[in-house]
Amino acid sequence: MNMILKAFRNFMSRRTIFAKVRNKFMNTYASNDLVKEVRAKVEIQRKEANRAHTVIYFHKVDDPYSALTIEYVDKISSAFDVVLKPVLVGKENSETVHEPTLYDDYCLRDVNCIANYYGVEFSSNTYPKKNLVDIANSILTAAKESDFISIARNVSKALWKNDEKYLKEFSRELSASPDAVKEKLALGNKIRNDKEYYYGSAFYYEKELYWGVDRIYHLEDRLDELGLRKNSLNKPICLPNLKAPEKLKSENKVNLYYYPSLNSPYTFVSAKGIREIQNDYPINLITKPVLPMLMRNMTIPAFKAKYIISDAAREGLKKGNPIGTIYSPIGKPARKAYSIFPIIDEANKGFEYINELLYASFYEGINIGDDDYLESTVKKLGLDWNTVSKKLGSNDWKKVLDNNLKDMYAGKCWGVPSFKITDLNDENPFYVWGQDRMWLIKEEIYKRISG
């Protein structure tokens, strides 16, 4: 019965008639006013309970991102007056991993790409062997909480180098029984799940989550608001070391493929960065929209959706592209808006059109499936509505978006926004996923142009 109810809820979540419920949910968790209200409330509760400022860190030994993040964990406790509580976790929540094989492959590839920018040595083309993962978990299960971070850092380095000798020698000094490990991981997963998170490499502080090195700066902002920094220097403790300039002029160009969807708050946040790259870097921008995940028969649990929209909202604020009022276009609105994309793209207005739709959906709270809105948008782009409207409601777009999705999946990317950089002859593809990686896009372009 539970499976039937879950399947029904997932089906109905994709229907247009549930737009009001979906919009209310998204607007609630995108609200900065709600964030401020919750922060004030939990701070009162913390003081009343006489709780220390406690930052929880979830560590997963065979998670590539944890191998990167563990190098920065102690910097938080060094810079801020907080108690750091490490929690060892195991397998990710399966509900939240939509393409397990692609997910594993992409995580490993991504960390290999970015580790050097964070000053971390990481080079592994494969995941650690299970027996070594078991040894690593055994060591960390037996470790004292006060020693966990330093031990975890050393264990992580050895694990990802497949240094079996080191791990076995370490485990002779420090190890736990298989039952104790199982119990430790189960408890860690329960703590993580109770905090409404689902992966490793994340921090939790008083009702908010901060994933990996990409979100440490948000945690720093939160702790700074509370006046917890130990010194007067407000220098960020975790930023990538970049070489690419803010602007790059060159006669040479590269192709930048952009894979957006119309129901993605992260895609909305990324649009500003894409405009900036288009203005400041020598690129040929090619926009290739795909269907939203919900319209691809994927399901997103409510707790993950809550994290995504709240995280995207704070990212938008930080990057000067705040989310305003949301009107989710799932269903008929998206289909109508997509139906005229091909003809608009033929007129070289593809990105401008998608950008307008995202702004309407995630800032103005407009139903982009409304004919009057579409007409005004087409005219705003300087195109003839009578010509464009002939494609309204047609099915030509379906093949276009399906091909776009296949192209995106070819790079082992399944979420949006994703990107692909190629030489002008479309060779040497470099795929990357997420608005978090806008800086990496610039680095790759700079490397190709200047190298």
Image (spheres, grey):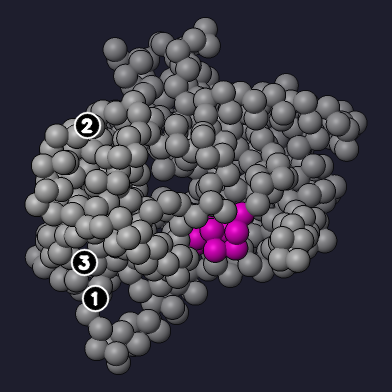
Q: Which residue is mark 1?
A: 53
In this rendering, does residue 393 appear at all? yes
Q: Residue at x 15, y 48 (%)?
A: 171
Q: Nearer the viewer, residue 407 or 183?
A: 183
In this rendering, does residue 248 appear at all? no
Q: Amino acid at mark 3?
A: Leu
Q: Secondary structure at mark 2?
A: loop
Closer to us: mark 2 or mark 1? Answer: 2
**Mark earlier in primary sequence (3, 2):** 3
User: Which label was assigned to residue 230?
Assistant: none
Closer to us: mark 3 or mark 2? Answer: 2
Closer to us: mark 3 or mark 1? Answer: 3
Q: Which residue is mark 2?
A: 161
Q: Around disc 3, counting alpha carbons within 10 Å, would you say few (fewer than 14), some (14 to 19), or many (20 or more)?
A: many
Q: Residue at x 33, y 82 (%)?
A: 43
Q: Around disc 1, counting alpha carbons within 10 Å, would you say few (fewer than 14), some (14 to 19), or many (20 or more)?
A: some
Residue 415 is covered by the magenta coloring:
no
Residue 323: x percent and y percent? 54, 57
Q: Nearer the viewer, residue 212 or 40?
A: 212
Q: Which residue is mark 3?
A: 84
Q: Give the answer, above or below, for where 339 lies relative to 26.
A: above
Residue 246: x percent and y percent? 32, 33
Q: Residue at x 22, y 43 (%)?
A: 156
